[in-house]
Image: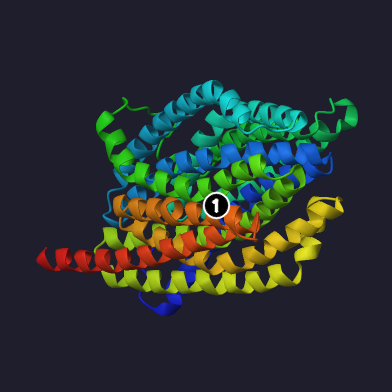
Amino acid sequence: MYHATSWKQRISLFFTILLPILITQISYSLMTMFDTMMSGHAGTGDLAGVAIGASLWMPVSIGLNGILMAITPMIAQLLGRKEKGQIARTVTQALYLSVLLAVVITGVGVVLLQPVLSMMHLEADVYRVATRYLGGLCIGIIPLFASNVIRYFFDAQGYTKISMSITVIAVPFNVLLNYLLIFGNWGFPKMGGVGAGYATGLTYWFILLLSVGVVFRVEATRGYKLFIQWYTPSWRMWKEQLSIGVPMGLSIFFEASIFSIVTLLMGSMYDTSTVAAHQSAINFTSMLFMMPLSIASTLTILVAFEVGSGRLEGARAYSRFGVSTAIGLLGITAVFLYLFREQVAMLYSNDPKVISLMMHFLVFGVFYQLSDAAQASLQGVLRGYKDTAVPFMIALAAYWGVGLPAGYAFAAWTSLGAYGFWVGIIAGLTGAAAGFAMRLAAVQRKARRELQRA
């Protein structure tokens, strides 16, 4: 990583960091997409069960990973201040915290899973698949969180190609396990959608082993002596990471949980085909969201690096370029989504009813792409400034104060029906984008004043 002094250098560095992050994010998304698609070809009940299970797990997973993501701006600002010697200690403390969080969430899941699913009044087959899918996935929670810490350690230093290589290798491994465990090929048990959970859990272990191996193999990371030199657990460092990471994690959780709560509400209000079509549409649009999400991660790294060295104009330049790029790219994918929505729907199911419903959901998905791009990239910039508490409040108000109530109202009391939930999602994302834009302007003014005083 280096300080760019011209727009040409900034754009070059931006895309050098972005492209591997994008491929990494798409790879993770592809694993979930293949779980859903391959389960759908095992049966509509399997598709709905995996959809329900994934809807419960996704917000929890990415919310907790948001807490761990705090080490990205922490490491990038340490690099900007030329305090490289503190990085190994920061990463080690994050690893301790990741294991602790994984153990806690596993315990909470054991206690709450059955009551939550029972409240949804699911069909017996869907209930069985959802329960066992999450049980299989549970075996990979600890390696998932630990490997994400290592991934953020790579990314914060600009070594995004390392994370990319690991996840690109993991995707075919996951697909192979799905092939074996969902359909019972090559003598393996035929588990249907349940097999997708076990395949994903085992893939997380595979990713962790690859990540640890790379730390020792690459000269640039071997010098930190991770997994060789251990530090005493430090509540002070955990507190610093949690003070940044908890608001980040909660912001991500409240955004992701809208989609999950909507799926759970649909499970109690509509039939299995509607739930399957909705979740399949969410699954595909979530993959498209990997573009602004990757841009947000890139902006966090570059903005934090510039802020750490006191180069606020460079941070502002990256902010403007990154947000504009996110909105532009999602505008292009929105057109693609509209034109090829039937072909996309046919990837997920052979059921004509599911295909028809999914096509209609994707039309609404076209409209929230731009708002989603804006709010995600703006949050990435704010994280680069280590500003996370106020954005969390904005996210809570926009997603749960506006989006979810509006969606339920449209679904329950208008002719939109299930599609009304998606109108609510659009409203929530648009409100969040506006709030983040105003907060960023205030944060940048404050940073400029503090630098002038210094």
Q: Where is the N terminus found, in terms of image quarters?
A: bottom left
x and y percent of residue 22 in the render?
A: 57, 58
Near-viewer residue (150 or 187): 187
The three-letter amino acid code for the residue at tag 1 is Tyr
Q: Residue at x 85, y 28 (%)?
A: 190
Q: Position of residue 6 (x, y in %)?
A: 38, 78
Query: Secondary structure beneath disc 1?
Result: helix
Q: Quadrant of residue 246?
A: top left
Q: Is residue 83 left or right of residue 26?
A: left
In the rendered view of the protein, which quadrant contains the C terminus?
bottom left
Instruction: Report the residue that reaches farthest toward the right.
Output: 186
Can you see residue 172?
Answer: no
Q: Quadrant of residue 233?
A: top left
- Which residue lies under the disc numbered 1? 408
* Whether residue 108 is situated above or below residue 386 in the rendered picture: above
Task: Relative to 315, say whether 147 is above or below.
Answer: above
